[in-house]
């Protein structure tokens, strides 16, 4: 039964722990709830924002519209040749889904262990970590079209995935609500340990022929050691994207900073490690009022307690200015600013 609440604190629903209020707040437990909700004039005439885990958003003020919290659960699987297709409700916690796959020995998402957030958010920004991106295992997703009230299936090609990008952040922003995602996973998986830190961690554990569970455990350990736990220190993971620049721009950067951490991209550009750029500007571990950057990963902005969204936003602007004046590179925020 659909329950629309008014004037609700969003503090429990965003991983930065920012205390703002939403004019309207509603939780969606199945697809019928969406159909019912958008049958109401109230929903049609509102500014809307969908949250899953609330782990990729910074609220800078009270939200005048309606926050829709995606809570659709359920995980099922079917074999498909040598592969297995696993479908998860958009409201499943991402790491619960990863654990389900690890427990069933379905390979492909173990490198994405412990990423905060929900399954439904995963295609929107093509989440990625430790050498794997969501798009590598994406089969299709189902989504509700807000303007027509119809459900539509998006294939891989429909999604236009890029680095932390998809059609849902781009051309179709705000038009669809993802209700489930189907992943193509392997039952005879080859694990991907090429990302430096994983191999070192497995070696330390004395594991020579790692399986899916070993990789998941190693990645989880690395994440816990490097990244702050949002249940104690508010944060939204990487606050900025790693900037991608043209080769001629890079020539200028490396001439002045020969040790700049960088990677070539598939389309012949250069991706710079934003964490490194920020650290070089002296921000790593800095506490500025109630906010700051994380001591082990400068790309993560944190709420040390009681920070407002504006505090965090203003601090992020200082970092952008500083990186721009030192390196001539413009950092882009990765989190949604509301
Ligand atoms: N680095 C520094 N100083 C720092 C942080 C990083 O010098 O404070 C250097 C590292 O030494 C390394 C390089 O920068 O040489 C890259 O660092 P790291 O491996 O930690 O990865 P990242 O590029 O900073 C990305 C993702 C993370 C993901 C990690 C691991 C983005 C925006 N972030 O971070 O994703 O966990 O790779 O694969 O692409 C997220 O998106 O919220 C997120 C946490």
Image (spheres, rainbow, N blue to C red):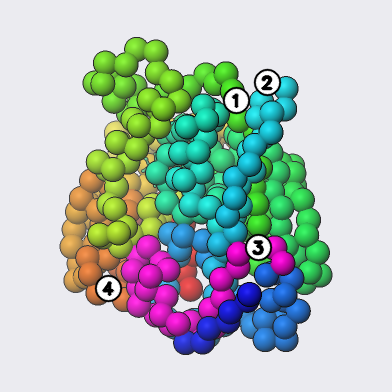
| Stretch of the chain drawn in magenta | 8-32
Q: Secondary structure at mark 1?
A: strand
Q: CA distance from mark 1 to mark 4?
A: 43 Å
Q: CA distance from mark 3 to mark 2?
A: 31 Å
Q: Secondary structure at mark 2?
A: loop
Q: Is residue 188 visible?
A: yes
Residue 179 is situated, as x and y percent measured from the top left of the image, at 66, 57
Q: CA distance from mark 1 to mark 2?
A: 7 Å
Say whether disc 3 or disc 2 marks the residue closer to the N-terminus: 3
> Which callout, 3 or 1, points to the residue nearer the camera?
3
Q: Which residue is mark 3?
A: 30
Tag 3 and tag 4, C-beta contact below 8 Å: no
> Which callout, 4 or 2, points to the residue nearer the camera?
2
Taking the spot 67% from the left edge, 86% from the top edge, the residue there is 42
Taking the spot 39% from the left edge, 13% from the top edge, the residue there is 209
Q: Is residue 145 magenta?
A: no
Q: CA distance from mark 3 to mark 4?
A: 34 Å
């Amino acid at each position: 039964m659909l329950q629309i609440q008014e004037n609700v604190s969003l503090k429990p629903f965003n991983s930065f722990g920012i205390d703002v209020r939403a004019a309207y707040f509603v939780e969606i437990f199945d697809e019928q709830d969406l159909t019912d909700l958008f049958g109401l004039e109230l929903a049609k005439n509102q500014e809307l924002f969908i949250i899953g885990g609330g782990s990729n958003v910074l609220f800078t003020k009270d939200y005048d519209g309606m926050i829709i919290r995606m809570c659709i659960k359920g995980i099922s699987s079917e074999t498909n040749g040598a592969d297995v297709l696993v479908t998860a409700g958009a409201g499943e916690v991402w790491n619960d889904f990863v654990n389900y796959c690890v427990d069933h020995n379905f390979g492909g998402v173990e490198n994405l262990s412990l990423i905060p957030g929900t399954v439904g958010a995963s295609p929107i920004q093509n989440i990625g970590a430790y050498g794997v991106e969501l798009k590598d295992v994406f089969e299709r997703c189902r989504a509700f079209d807000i303007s027509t009230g119809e459900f539509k299936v998006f294939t891989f090609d429909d999604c236009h995935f890029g680095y932390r990008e998809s059609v849902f952040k781009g051309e179709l922003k705000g038009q669809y609500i993802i209700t489930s995602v189907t992943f193509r996973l392997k039952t005879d998986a080859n694990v991907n340990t090429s990302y430096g830190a994983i191999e070192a961690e497995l070696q330390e554990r004395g594991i020579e022929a790692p399986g899916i569970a070993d990789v998941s455990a190693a990645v989880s350990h690395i994440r816990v050691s490097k990244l702050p736990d949002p249940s104690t220190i508010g944060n939204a993971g990487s606050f900025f994207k790693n900037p991608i620049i043209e080769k001629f721009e890079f020539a200028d950067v490396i001439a002045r900073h020969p040790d700049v951490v960088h990677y070539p991209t598939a389309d012949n550009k250069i991706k710079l490690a934003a964490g490194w750029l920020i650290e070089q500007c002296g921000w790593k571990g800095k506490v500025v009022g109630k906010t700051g950057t994380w001591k082990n990963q400068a790309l993560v902005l944190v709420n040390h307690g009681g920070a407002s969204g504006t505090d965090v936003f203003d601090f992020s602007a200082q970092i952008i200015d500083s990186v721009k004046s030192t390196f001539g590179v413009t950092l882009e925020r990765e989190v949604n600013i509301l």
